[in-house]
Image (cartoon, rainbow, N blue to C red):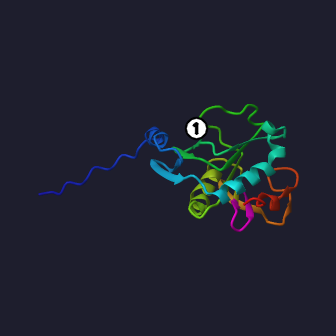
Amino acid sequence: MHAMSEPARRRPTFDEVYRQIVALPHGVTGQILEPGVLTTMSRPGVAHELALLGVYDGLGGSDARREGKGWWLLREMEIRFAGERLAVPDLVGFRVERTPELPRDNPMVIVPDFCAEVLSPTTARQDRMLKLPMYAECGVRWMWLVDPELRIVEVFEAVDGRPMRVAGAEEGSVGALPPFEGEQHVGRWWSNA
């Protein structure tokens, strides 16, 4: 008598997992960081939100929607990436010269030029180990990891599809942070955090 093996499980499609995301309760964010796998997280805490607002406000001079120049900057947008993956970066940027009009689709299918993640104790590992390499592999040129606890920002550039750390700044730093022009007063990002 031969033992029957179990049939191989079919990996859920992007559309099947995305339907699960749409059905999630309010306050729960769903992502597909590995094909066919739903990852969820609750809404961030106050320190995370205040740090994100600090970064967003600090980059306001670059945001075309806020009378800046060069970039469309958006918070927490769903972005569909190659390989049937979906992420919700804390902050995304599209160069106006490459994307003259802001996309209206959801999830967005245009790969951003910039993604930033504000680290929190529950997401730091995922942001660093899954999202950062995925962004670089999928064509995001610039990535930031912002740590409100350590009050630092790390700047990465995609080189041959891999994230390479090219700059960083800490609480008292003032200077340019690629890919944005002009000085960033990083200490101001934490004023309310």
Q: Residue furthest left?
A: 1
* Range of magenta residues: 146-158
Decide which of 152, 46 is in the foreground and name it.
46
Location of the C terminus by quadrant is bottom right
Q: Is residue 161 above or below residue 16?
A: below
Residue 154 seen in this snapshot: yes
- Give the residue number, with chain letter if any, for mark 1: 107
Residue appearing at x 45%, y 39% in the figure: 19
Q: Report whether 9 appears left or right of 77.
A: left
Q: Is residue 169 above or below residue 8?
A: below
Magenta region, main secondary structure: strand
Residue appearing at x 69%, y 48% in the figure: 91
Q: Amino acid at mark 1?
A: Pro
Residue appearing at x 68%, y 43% in the figure: 112
Location of the N terminus by quadrant is bottom left
Percent x, y of residue 180: 82, 50
| Dot 1 crowding, Cα within 10 Å, few <14, some 14–19, many 20+ | some
In which quadrant of the rendered view does residue 175 lie?
bottom right
Is 154 covered by the magenta stretch? yes
Element at badge 1? loop
Q: Report whether 79 appears left or right of 4.
A: right
Percent x, y of residue 86: 55, 45
The total number of labels drawn is 1
Is 110 covered by the magenta stretch? no
Residue 118 seen in this snapshot: no
Decide which of 125, 27 is in the foreground and name it.
27
Percent x, y of residue 57: 78, 49
Q: Report whether 174 appears left or right of 80.
A: right
Q: Report whether 168 appears left or right of 92.
A: right
